[in-house]
Amino acid sequence: MSNLIEIKNLTISFEIEGGKIIAVDNSSFEIKRGQVVGLVGESGCGKSVTAMSILRLLPMPPGKYESGEIIFDEKNIRTLSIPELNKVRGARIGMIFQEPMTALSPLMKIGNQISETLQTHHKMTKAETWACGVEWLKKVGISDAEQKMNSFPFELSGGMRQRVMIAMAQMLEPDLIIADEPTTALDVTIQAQVFELMKEVRGNESSMLLITHDMGVIWENCDRVIVMYASQIIEMGSLHEIFTDAKHPYTQGLLKAVPKLDEQMGRMETIEGNVPAPSNYPKGCHFSTRCPHATDKCHNKKPPMTIINDSHKVKCFLATEEGV
Amino acid sequence: MNEPLVEIKNLKTWYPIKRGVFARTVGHVKAVDDITINIEKGETIGLVGESGCGKTTFGRTIIGLEKAASGSVLFKGKDLTTMNSADRKKCSQNIQMIFQDPFSSLNPRLTIMDIITEGLIEHNKIEKSIEADATRLLEEVGLNHEALYRYPHEFSGGQRQRIGVARAIGLKPDLIICDESVSALDVSVQAQVINLLMDLRDKYQLSYLFISHDLSVVRQISTKIAVMYLGKIVEFGPTKQIIENPQHPYTKALISAVPVPGKTIKDRVVLKGEIPSASNPPPGCRFHTRCPIATDNCKQEIPELENKGNTQVACFNTDND
């Protein structure tokens, strides 16, 4: 299958008081048509910044593209003019944010927000957009949709608001949906509903970049997995490769540290130490300060991305030399 | 059998809903509605449920941060809800709390030493010196004494949560209420704090009331699990039993909804609809509006928590499915 979007050597920095920090460090990955790619990592690792940067949603300054290309439809999103960019936003690449309360305007009725989105991208009358809105709210399982079109976001529950977000992202039929922790704020029974719904309305053609910290969510929804740690992509591979044959010590540690529902594990496996601060990343491998296998080389040199096979890549010296 | 450490009987915490010019009470939010449960020494009870089900209010009522509308909380036989403030203060050192948000639960203007010894000073429990006691507590939670004169903002989320733990164990409590204490932490750090809590439990024979929405975490640390729905406990029993062989339809749905890495989804019960408002709970069984096996009887009568094998279940229809 062809690549829908290709991110090449993306580096993003933020200016902070007294200096500059690198939030995304030389990331490259691609998403194929119809694929669901999971982006997993701990807070502050740069996964949300990666997501926001794809649609140029980061405030600049303080943010800055240091380098890299975002190739979508043979065009580099970074160099698009604003009118061209606005045709991509929403219509070709949709976005679902973590907290629907802050992503929806609190002062506009749901119906008006839906109309606005539709009218921006299609030549439609208000009445047509309204009818379309009702239809989509029904599709995402909102009962009494007509009435909900006249509601304000605060009148809806969290799960309901996330359904509205999904409807708004999906109704323009984008090729790619970027979902940034779409269910983190929701309860687990509602999370199950939302993912089932997303599968249903997405269809087979469109792709998704699913950002989450929850390995269980990745497992159930993704075809491929990208693991980020401290601003870098440290491993990527098919779902199967990551879950059964992870090469990077961080990925391995992360998978072991996840509490499992179906097993009482006694003392939990942990990764010692804490994630280093962005202003204070180690000189060599970013994981070297916490890695149980780190050598002198790891502390001093940055490991390159090593290709294991067509889909599986890892950024670790040890994974290639003698195996971990 | 010994007397339980804490005996909670028919506990209700209701918040009045006030309307109009004279702020007339027009109804109540029944956040905790008639809960009876015992906590034994050394036992960890995991309290699970979805947001808004009243689990936090329940924890806060036990420790006295919310006032109970009725019912009693007997701590070693003495009722905390009717006690005068002097006795209450004496008792309060035996029950401590670790909060969810490691950022807002530590006073940003106090040094770590001040934070973790505040309770000791208040209760005259300083053993050697403030500094020595604080150092000992920090070591207990895996931090070193360099932290003493630093401020909360200098620490990461995981370290702050350790400081919260140090503060809680300072007074050598019998019961610690952990309210979503590891929910805000990243997986790798979360595991460290869970281990710390388990180590301290074994060392000091602590009891925990471990409130969490994350069943996988609760599974690791709890000896028993209580499942709450809209202010009521719907199922209560040994951890293994609840996870592997849940009886109540809500527990079943809750457990089947948890995504487990490496497991294929089978028999997932996807619940329809959402949790109703606690200010206007449905009559009869509160779960009947979303229950896949509800009958007419469920819409009228409230099921009581009854013994079924070695668990307690509040459901009319558990036998016949």
Image (tube, helix red, strand yellow):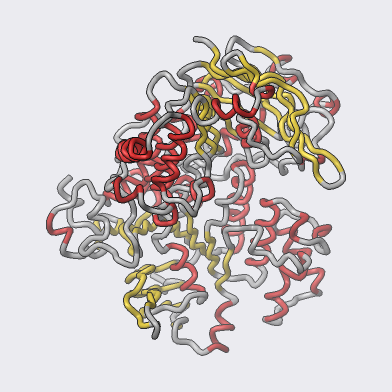
Q: Position of residue B143 (x, y in %)?
A: 75, 55
Give whichever of A208, A156 is nearer the camera: A156
Give whichever of A60, B282 is nearer the camera: A60
Give whichever of B290, B252 is nearer the camera: B290
Q: Position of residue A55 (x, y in %)?
A: 61, 30
Q: Position of residue A56 (x, y in %)?
A: 64, 32
- The residue lying at 41 percent from left, 42 percent from top is A164
Residue A96 visible somewhere in the drawing: yes
Position of residue A164 relative to residue A315, above or below, is below
Residue A25 found in image quarter:
top right
Q: Report whether B62 appears left or right of B202.
A: left
- The residue lying at 24 percent from left, 54 percent from top is B289
Residue A252 visible somewhere in the drawing: no
Give whichever of B136, A146 is nearer the camera: A146
Q: Report whether B219 appears left or right of A22.
A: left
Residue A141 found in image quarter:
top left
Q: Report whether A78 appears left or right of B48.
A: right
Quadrant that contains the C terminus of chain A: top right
- The residue lying at 81 percent from left, 68 percent from top is B132
Position of residue A116 relative to residue A39, above or below, is below
- The residue lying at 56 percent from left, 21 percent from top is A245
Q: Where is residue A39 in the image (x, y as percent from the top left)?
A: 57, 30
Number of numbered tags placed on the structure image: 0
